Image (spheres, grey):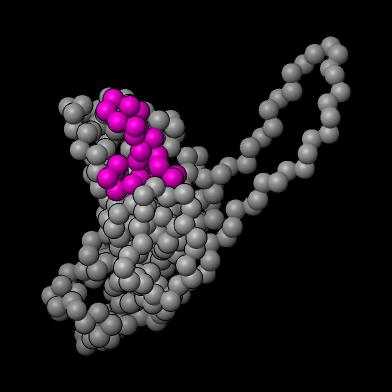
Amino acid sequence: MAITALPPDTDADIARVTETLAMITPRWTARILLALSGPPARYHELAAKVPWLASGQLHSKLTALCHDGLVERTEHTARHVTYGHTDRGTALLRTLPTIVTWAQEHLEKADRPLPAIEQIEDSLTLLTRRHAVAILWVLKSRQDASARALARIVTPHCDATNIYHPLRQLVADGLVDTDGKREPYRLSVAGEGLGPVLGALSAWAAGQPLDQAVQHPVWGHPQRTSAPRPWTSSQSRLAPAAPSTTKAPQATPAWNERDIFSHAVTARPKVAAAAGGPRR
């Protein structure tokens, strides 16, 4: 069943990314996934890495991760059971550095240096606001839109006024801008900066290699084909075009478990974020 009034392929894309975020955003989930980095571990070995979790909590989290296909439970004998990432779980971990990079550039600065895992959790919280993914998708595609237009597209089966609370929340979070009442809404600098994050999550959810994120039709940077030249009987000679200065997109840095858990990450300069950036 369609969740928006967007074309079916776009609607399915949004639904997959929303479902992916719902898998990894619940409290402690990302930390458990990171704690499982490396060889498969027995339950007590994993519990030692996440001592703040009660045994019952860890068990239920592992059950959910196994159900979602991110973690595999292997029963070697009745007394020897291990947990480890599936291939899909390993691939999902590779999206986390992109989230850290966005957080360093756009989230408001904390009073203390934050471990990368906390930056991931703060970022995921913003993205799992109600209707957030669909609203961001529409605003990226249309540049700007009124609340009424967003309601028709994002929540076509609901009362139009239901869109106002999610919009106000995204404005308060610093992902969406507006000039005031009845003005069109548009992505903020931080909202535009989510391209690599949402593109990577979309690629993962569709089962594609993460390097395909740059080709995403909304959040990527697909190669532009040159426009067809007009046919005229006598074209004037044009001056030689200046060499292109477009930079190739930078590759996502390689991160490992130690990088994610530690707060010894290289600070990156903040770019034109509004009033301290999206709040945590």
Can residue 156 be seen at all in this image of the molecule? yes
Q: Is residue 134 magenta?
A: no
Q: Is residue 129 above or below residue 183?
A: below
Q: Is residue 262 above or below residue 65?
A: below
Q: x and y percent of residue 3 in the render?
A: 27, 35
Residue at the top extreme of this rendering: 233
* Residue at horizontal 42 percent and vertical 50 percent from the top: 273
Q: Quadrant of residue 50?
A: bottom left
Horizontal side of residue 52 vs 245, given as left or right: left
Q: Is residue 172 magenta?
A: yes
Q: Quadrant of residue 147?
A: top left
* Residue at horizontal 44 percent and vertical 32 percent from the top: 143
Q: How many marks?
A: 0
Q: Which residues are magenta?
A: 170-194
Q: x and y percent of residue 109 in the render?
A: 36, 62
The quadrant in which the N terminus is found is top left
Q: x and y percent of residue 12 in the render?
A: 36, 40
Q: x and y percent of residue 110 in the render?
A: 32, 65
* Residue at horizontal 58 percent and vertical 42 percent from the top: 222
The quadrant in which the C terminus is found is bottom left
Q: Quadrant of residue 39?
A: bottom left
